[in-house]
Structure formats: structure tokens, C-alpha cells
Amino acid sequence: MFKYFLKRLLWMIPIVLGVAIITFTLLYFTPGDPAYIILGSNATEVELENLRETLGVNQPYLVRLVKYLGDVFLRFDLGTSYSTKTSVTGELIYRLPNTLLLTIASLAISVLIGLPLGVTAAVNQNRLGDRVSMLLALLGVSMPSFWLAMLLVILFAVKLHWLPAMGVGGLKYWILPALSGSTGGIASIARQTRSSMLEVIRSDYVTTARAKGVKERNVIYGHALPNALIPIITLVGTQFGMMLGGTLILENIFGIPGVGSYLTTAVSSRDYPVVQGGVVFLAICFSFCMLMVDMIYALVDPRIKAQYEGKKGK
């Protein structure tokens, strides 16, 4: 099991390294002078040149790349913001809890609704329950989250005054953002659950359980669903990573000070260290998320554990 974990952990290194190199390269060739962005149009050429020397932006590409990778992976320093002069690492860590809370809440709603919806569709294949479930899934996957977010704000915040329109605070502040971010996940999980359940629901062990008189509910949730979980777990892990990086618009709509709103502001102001650091930071978070998915694989599917234990025995 440890060997399996170590192998998956080592795979994170080239992934995050590749993301860092690609992000740095794209921003290196992006038009714009960081010194001009910081000092503004009133700065003299001497001041601009001195700042370029201080920032090191007048150095060759390879020199800057090596220095950047050293700062990130050896010193764990993602740089300093051009606009606020604060540490990018510190700001990301400070904002991460808000983004994580929104992501986890959205994913929890997606699983709690999407999983039973997919099971219902599989059990009632080609019948009314299947058609209704898949229609709801189609609506969910087709509905942009930002559009739904604005509709929810207009209805529940502006018209009914039941929930706050923006900001962070107690539970009520997270209801509308979480609902807005969950629709795509509900649809994807429902469709994947239906597909996985249909593959196992006609298996011999399911037929045997029914022949023994096991209740249908126990057959579905005790025998069929556990064996259909592997692709669902993959999707849930991927959805978590996508939601983690896809909260940019929702955080701006609802005024949530998270990683997404931080990156959006940085992009509009050409704050390159924040953009670079934010992308690398999200890549690390996503990689750890997929690592957790692999660990859950080993717990759910004993074949993975047996495979590595068998190799160890040989």
C-alpha cells in the first residue's frame, strides 16, 4: 500500500513542474512591462530600468525560469504581488479556506443529489424515472453557473430577501454560492452513476442476491452500487479539482474573498506573480486531490492492494 502511495506521490512532481514551466513561459512572452505596470506612466526611463534590474525581468528567459523554479520548489516562495507588494503564498493560504468551503459545499450537494438521481435512472431504465432523471441532468449540465447564480440572487436576495446577496459569514451566506456551483456536478455525477450502475446491475451476483430474496434496496445499495463506485470516485475527484479552479466567477458574483477572485483581479491588472503562483498553487491542490482519489481506489477496490502486496511477496 505504501509503495502504491509513493508511486502516486512521485507522479505529482513532473505534473506540477510542467504546469509551472508552461505558466511561466506563457506569461514571459505575454506583452507588457512589469516595471511600467508597477510605476505607471509618470515614471522616467531611469526609474523603469532600475526597477527592471531589481525585479530581474531584464534577464534571459532561461535564467529567469531557473530562478523561478528554484524559488517555487526549493524555497516555497511564489513571489510578491506587483500591485499590493504582499506575499503571493501568504495571500493564497489566507484565501484558500473560503475557496475550499465553497468547493466542498458544492461538491457535497452534487453527490447527495446526483448519486440517488443516477441510481433511480438506472433502476428505472427507459421508464419515467429514467427520463425525468436524465432530463434534470441535461438541464443541469446545460445551465451556466453564473447565469443560475444571478437568477438565485435576484429571486432569494433581491425579491424575497431571504438570503444575503454577497459576502461571507454564517451558513446563509454560502447557500446561494453552493447551489450555483453544484448544478454541473449533479448532472455529471447522475449520468456517470447511471452508466456505471447499468453495467453491474445485470451481473450474476446481483441476480443471485435477488434470487436469495434480498430486498431490492439492499441489492441496489449493498451489492450493485459499491461495485459501480470506481468510475464515480474518479468523476467526483475530477469534479472537486474543476470546482476548485472554477469558482472564479462565483467568487466575484457573491463577493467571496477566495483564490478565484484573487486570480481574476490579478489577470485584469496584469499582476504576473499572482497569476503564476495561483496557477501553480491550484495545480498542487488538484494533484493532492487526485492523490486522495487514488488512495480511495485502493480502499474500495481490493484488487489494487492485492496487486502491490503480490509484487512485494515476489
Image (tube, rainbow, N blue to C red):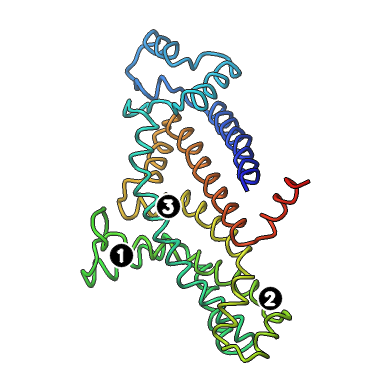
Q: Amino acid at mark 3?
A: Thr
Q: Residue 147 placed where, x, y %?
A: 41, 63
Q: Residue 220 placed where, x, y %?
A: 59, 81
Instruction: Farthest residue to the left: give it.
Output: 161
Q: Mark 2 falls on what kind of element?
A: helix
Q: CA distance from mark 1 to mark 3?
A: 16 Å
Q: Amino acid at mark 2?
A: Val
Q: Image quadrant of residue 190?
A: bottom right
Circle 2 is placed at which residue position?
Answer: 200
Looking at the image, tell me whether mark 1 or mark 3 is earlier in sequence order. Answer: 1
Q: In the image, which disc is placed on residue 295?
A: none
Q: Residue at x 48, y 26 (%)?
A: 32
Q: CA distance from mark 2 to mark 1?
A: 41 Å
Q: Residue at x 41, y 42 (%)?
A: 264
Q: Nearer the viewer, residue 5 or 130?
A: 5
Q: Nearer the viewer, residue 312 or 60?
A: 312
Is 171 placed above or below 286 here? below
Is 135 placed above or below 150 here? below
Q: Could you tell whether 103 is left or right of 10 in the image?
A: left
Q: Nearer the viewer, residue 113 or 159?
A: 113
Q: Residue at x 47, y 15 (%)?
A: 56
Q: CA distance from mark 3 to mark 2?
A: 35 Å
Circle 3 is placed at which residue position?
Answer: 247
Q: Residue 296 placed where, x, y %?
A: 57, 56
Q: Mark 3 falls on what kind of element?
A: loop
Q: Amino acid at mark 1?
A: Val
Q: In the image, which disc is placed on residue 153?
A: 1
